[in-house]
Image (spheres, grey):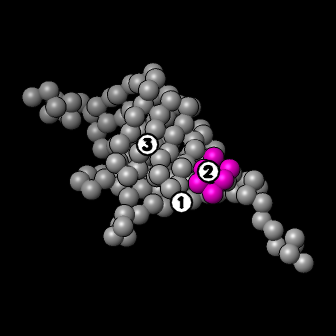
Amino acid sequence: MATESFLSLQAPIQKFFLPMFTPEGKKQWDVEGQEATINNLDRVEIKHMKMCIFPASSGEWHIESPSAYVFIKSAVVEGRDRLLVQGEGFQVSGNDWQWFGKKRHLVVHQCVEVRFDPHLASQILK
């Protein structure tokens, strides 16, 4: 019977993982969470979100937030909860944020705090 094979998009997905690639097939970033709910075919709500960004030039960025929304078609991830970004020589935290995956651009709107490794800070201030 057709109703037996019906899959509800509202059912939570445990251990969600979504990799994002360039048109050439190179991995740009991925996002994962302990639990995700697909609200529609483009918007995914993720609990205990973790992202890994693979910059073209230097080390990875690791991003964590208690919850976030992923908009798959536009490659945007956003959240209102606290965000923590850790990269090679820096750390950023704040609230109300957006990651624009196609532009590789992060915007943090509230309570922004940026910390640099002392060695990196001395190089920036030269």
Residue 22 seen in the current view = yes
Report the Cα–Cα distance between label 2 and label 3.
14 Å
| Position in image of residue 48 (x %, y %) | 60, 44
| Position in image of residue 93 (x %, y %) | 43, 30
Lateral position of residue 1 relative to residue 41, left or right: right
Q: Which residues are magenta?
A: 39-45
Residue behind mark 1: 18
Secondary structure beneath dot 3 equals strand
Front-lying residue, 72 or 122: 72
Look at 35% across and 42% down and name the residue there: 105
Q: Which mark is residue 99?
A: 3
Residue 93 seen in the current view = no
Q: At label 1, which amino acid type do we have?
A: Leu
Front-lying residue, 21 or 51: 21
Q: At label 3, which amino acid type do we have?
A: Trp
Residue behind mark 2: 44
Report the Cα–Cα distance between label 2 and label 1.
10 Å
Label 3 crowding class (10 Å Cα cut-off): few <14, some 14-19, many 20+?
some
